[in-house]
Image (cartoon, coloured by chain):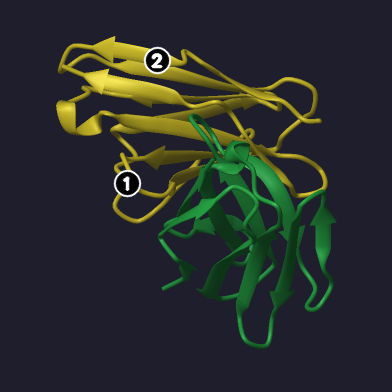
Chain colours: A yellow, B green
Amino acid sequence: GAVVSQHPSWVICKSGTSVKIECRSLDFQATTMFWYRQFPKQSLMLMATSNEGSKATYEQGVEKDKFLINHASLTLSTLTVTSAHPEDSSFYICSARDNSDTQYFGPGTRLTVL
Amino acid sequence: EDKVVQSPLSLVVHEGDTVTLNCSYEVTNFRSLLWYKQEKKAPTFLFMLTSSGIEKKSGRLSSILDKKELFSILNITATQTGDSAIYLCAVEAGGGAQKLVFGQGTRLTINP
């Protein structure tokens, strides 16, 4: 089946630093990838839709200047959390949509900001 | 505002029992409803439903969609401890964006 990877799987950083998370579709091309955030004991919340070769579409309440998304190729999207603060600590999950419109999720990245 | 509601939020049963998880939705431009199982990390895909009344089945799991009443159920028969997880329902909605709207999830615990 389709495989999506994320790197890193976990990261701890100091407040004020920037963190980049990569999302790759390993065995299929994905023109669209999605970034979600999940706080403890809560469901996934869509942050943004990442389209290859164009600007990402952000959900209401998500700061595009804080969460920079780059979808430079058909297999890679990156999310950069700029000037991270403790309230940004969360589980970030990406998904990639294949040509049958099924979304496959990456394993997630746990971000802890000290 | 698009909304997906799951019930119950939490369920504890004994191994061998049958469980039914519920998902109701109110969205614009419905495309499909999906069920995912989430254990420790990211959700894994179970079913995609697009048509009413057609049961999807995979082993002990089955699911059906009612587009008139706007709900879906996920059934698990002869439950095993390995079925313990959070089960997420998501609806693909919207025009061009085709984004997933997730419910809160049902935390299922199977006791031996």
Q: Nearer the viewer, residue A20 or B20?
A: B20
**Residue name at image x 41 percent, y 73 percent:** B1
Residue B97 can be seen in this image: no
Q: CA distance from mark 1 to mark 2?
A: 22 Å
Residue corresponding to mark 1 = A62
Position of residue B102 measured from the top left corner of the image (x, y, whole percent): 49, 57
Which amino acid, by three-letter code, is at mark 1? Val
Q: Chain of mark 2?
A: A
Residue B72 can be seen in this image: yes
**Residue name at image x 44 percent, y 23 percent:** A109
Q: Quadrant of the C terminus of chain B?
A: top right
Q: Earlier in the sequence, mark 1 or mark 2?
A: 2
Which type of secondary structure does the marked residue at label 1 adopt? loop
Side (left or right) of A68 relative to B17: left
| Vertical order, B91 against B88 (above or below) | below
Position of residue B39 measured from the top left corner of the image (x, y, whole percent): 52, 35
**Residue name at image x 70 percent, y 80 percent:** B66
| Vertical order, A8 against A93 (above or below) | above
Position of residue A18 measured from the top left corner of the image (x, y, whole percent): 28, 16
Residue corresponding to mark 2 = A10
Which type of secondary structure does the marked residue at label 2 adopt? strand
**Residue name at image x 45 percent, y 19 percent:** A21
Q: Which mark is residue A54?
A: none
| Vertical order, A50 against B6 (above or below) | above
User: Dot 2 surroundings within 10 Å: few (below 14), some, or many (20 or more)?
Assistant: some
Q: Residue furthest bottom?
A: B68
Q: Nearer the viewer, residue A44 or B6?
A: B6
Side (left or right) of B57 relative to B6: right
| Vertical order, A19 against B85 (above or below) | above
Which amino acid, by three-letter code, is at mark 2? Trp
User: Dot 1 surroundings within 10 Å: few (below 14), some, or many (20 or more)?
Assistant: few
